[in-house]
Image (tube, rainbow, N blue to C red):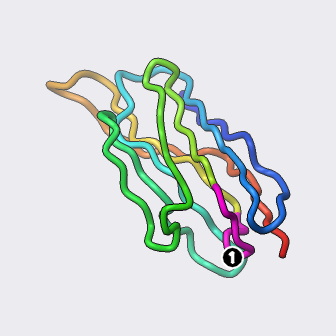
Amino acid sequence: QVQLVESGGGLVQAGGSLGLSCAASGSFFRIDAMGWYRQAPGKQRELVATITRIRDTAYADSVGGRFTISRDNAKNTVYLQMNSLKPEDTAVYYCNAKVLKGSTAYYTASDYWGQGTQVTVSS
């Protein structure tokens, strides 16, 4: 089974920084795109940032250059460095990975999610 485990969430004051990590483990051929999503109370889950296997990145407009996503393919780990945090960044942050099982010639692709880590930004 594939498991994604996030870490690094916590409480921080506005303007502060936090770094999140997500490590994938289990049986799979390859991890393609990875990303971070977040969900605030009463709101739908939204995309924060994504990164491809060759490290092309994309960010939500709301991030505004404050966040940086990166990955270590050897460790099957994706990171999210969050700077200049705002109260509206408060949410549960979820790691996502597109996991390939099989081979490049014939494979199955599935999205896996971490358990979520709470990020709370106080004003």
Quadrant of the rendered structure where residue 4 is? top right
Instruction: In the rendered view, tell whether residue 18 sits above or below residue 23.
Output: below
Q: How many marks?
A: 1
SS at mark 1?
helix
6 or 88: nearer the eye?
88
23 or 105: nearer the eye?
23
**Residue 87 painted magenta:** yes
* Residue 106 placement (x, y as % from top left): 18, 27
Rendered residue at 68%/44% (across/down):
19
Rendered residue at 68%/47% (across/down):
115
Quadrant of the rendered structure where residue 31 is? top left
108 left or right of 23 in image = left
83 left or right of 54 in image = right
Question: How dense is the environment of label 1, judged by Cα within 10 Å: few (below 14), some, or many (20 and up)?
Answer: few
Q: What segment carries the magenta color?
A: 83-91
Instruction: In the rendered view, tell whether residue 96 sits above or below residue 92.
Output: above
Rendered residue at 14%/25% (across/down):
105
Q: Which residue is mark 1?
A: 88
* Residue 25 placement (x, y as % from top left): 56, 24
In the rendered structure, which amino acid carries the disc numbered 1? Glu
The quadrant of the image that shows the N terminus is top right
